[in-house]
């Protein structure tokens, strides 16, 4: 698999996860809306907009990788 293919797959997977999350937010909104008779149901638009406005930078990805490595090392020390 070439790098561009991997990047395409990862981008598409990320988009699908965002869509699924937005769908769950809307489902929860409508459940609350109809359960409470339309009272106190907050609009999900702000949550969904923040979901789609976040972009992960390379630095964020590197920090996440370092956290994972640190957890793996800690597990090895705990079990070793």
Image (tube, grey):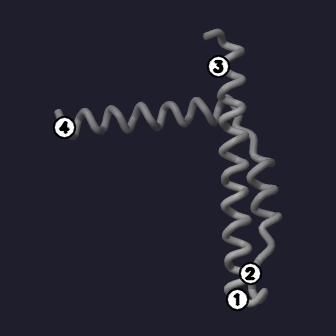
The image quadrant where one finds the N terminus is: top right
Instruction: Check contact, mark 1 vs mark 2: CB within 8 A.
Output: yes
Closer to viewer: mark 1 or mark 4: 1
Instruction: Report helix, strand or loop for mark 3.
Output: helix
- From the viewer's perspective, tell me whether residue 53 is left or right of residue 35: right
Q: Residues within 10 Å of mark 4 (few under 14, many from 20)?
A: few
- Alpha carbon of mark 3 to alpha carbon of mark 4: how far? 34 Å
The image quadrant where one finds the C terminus is: top left
- Alpha carbon of mark 1 to alpha carbon of mark 2: how far? 6 Å
Which residue in the structure is indicated by mark 2?
33
Location of residue 27 in the rendering, given as x and y in whole percent from the top left corner:
69, 67
Location of residue 3 in the rendering, given as x and y in whole percent from the top left corner:
66, 13
Location of residue 19 in the rendering, given as x and y in whole percent from the top left corner:
73, 49
Q: Residue at x 67, y 85 (%)?
A: 35
* Numbered label attached to residue 6: 3
Which residue in the structure is indicated by mark 4?
79
């Amino acid at each position: 698999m070439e790098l561009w293919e991997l990047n395409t797959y990862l981008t598409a997977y990320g988009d699908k996860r965002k869509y699924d999350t937005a769908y769950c937010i809307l489902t929860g909104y409508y459940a609350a809306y109809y359960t409470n008779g339309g009272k106190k149901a907050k609009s999900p638009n702000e949550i969904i907009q923040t979901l789609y406005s976040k972009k992960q930078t390379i630095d964020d990805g590197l920090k996440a990788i370092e956290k994972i490595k640190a957890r793996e090392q800690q597990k090895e020390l705990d079990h070793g």
